């Protein structure tokens, strides 16, 4: 696609529920990143994929968070047993060659846990 | 902890004035990037400067990098109301060698018409 697409744009869920957030990167971009951004803060790194594999998942806050990228394109961030503290904007970015080019971000998914 | 920190946290200027934002970081980098964010949603890549570069221009944007001081600055000349946004610097430092952009808290810029 022309840009990074994230769906849904907004998600409201009840505490304790399971949610999935989807990211469709730019075609051909092998590097994919998930970030979480709280109000007034900068994006906080969650996980990085190179192709199908998670190259670095050190930013995932706990085992309720999991992400997959089974075919090396679309990625899904999964959050189990959501908590109110999970409320944030979840951003996805992709890149062709991380060292030489910038990263293209999607518009994010605003997750609200009530 | 965040690798890059922007300064000031907030900046308010009149249209036509120049806006300067600074970024300091802690460890060695391969490159440093500046992004703009409107209304707390997607970030837009503005400019990338490599560690062996000292200055880079793109339109009304000028970025400098001083690796000895571990700092960078973003200058927006002749600002417009449409430049109102949050601006973030990102360095690609990450333990283990992965190229993962790490962001600061950003500078909130308001340009008054």
Image (cartoon, coloured by chain):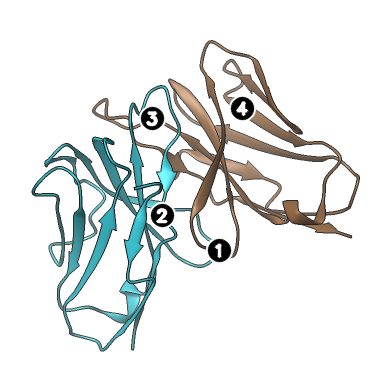
Label 4 lies in what chain?
B
Q: Which residue is mark 4?
A: B71
Kindly indicate the quadrant of the structure image that contains residue A112.
Answer: bottom left
Q: Residue B18: give its label.
A: none
Q: From where the camera sits, is residue B37 visible?
A: yes
Q: Determine if marks 4 and 2 fall on one subunit.
A: no
Of residues B96 and B52, which is closer to you in this image? B52
Kindly indicate the quadrant of the structure image that contains residue A109.
Answer: bottom left
Spot the brown chain and give its letter. Answer: B
Tags 4 and 1 in contact by the CB under 8 Å rule?
Answer: no
How far apart marks 4 and 3 lie (CA) works out to: 14 Å
Q: Which residue is mark 2?
A: A106
Identify whether B69 is placed above or below A113: above
Chain A: give its colour. Answer: cyan
Q: Residue at x 16, y 78 (%)?
A: A18
Q: Residue at x 50, y 62 (%)?
A: B41
Residue B2 lies, in percent from the top left, at 45, 44
């Amino acid at each position: 696609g022309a840009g990074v697409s994230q769906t849904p744009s907004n998600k409201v869920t009840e505490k304790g529920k399971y949610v999935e957030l989807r990211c469709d990167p730019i075609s051909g971009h092998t590097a994919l990143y998930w970030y979480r951004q709280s109000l007034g803060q900068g994006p906080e790194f969650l996980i990085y994929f190179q192709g199908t594999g998670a190259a670095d998942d050190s930013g995932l806050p706990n085992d309720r968070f999991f992400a997959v990228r089974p075919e090396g394109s679309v990625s899904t961030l999964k959050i189990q047993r959501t908590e109110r503290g999970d409320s944030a904007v979840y951003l996805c970015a992709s890149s062709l060659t991380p060292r030489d080019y910038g990263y293209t971000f999607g518009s994010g998914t605003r997750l609200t846990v009530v | 902890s965040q690798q890059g920190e922007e300064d000031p946290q907030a900046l308010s200027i009149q249209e036509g004035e120049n806006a300067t934002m600074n970024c300091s970081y802690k460890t060695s980098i391969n490159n440093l990037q500046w992004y703009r964010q409107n209304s707390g949603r997607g970030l837009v890549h503005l400019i990338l400067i490599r560690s062996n570069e000292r200055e880079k221009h793109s339109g009304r944007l000028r970025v400098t990098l001083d690796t000895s001081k571990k700092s960078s600055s973003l200058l927006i000349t002749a600002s417009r109301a449409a430049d109102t946004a949050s601006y973030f610097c990102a360095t690609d430092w990450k333990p283990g060698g992965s190229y993962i952009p790490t962001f600061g808290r950003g500078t909130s810029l308001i340009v008054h018409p």
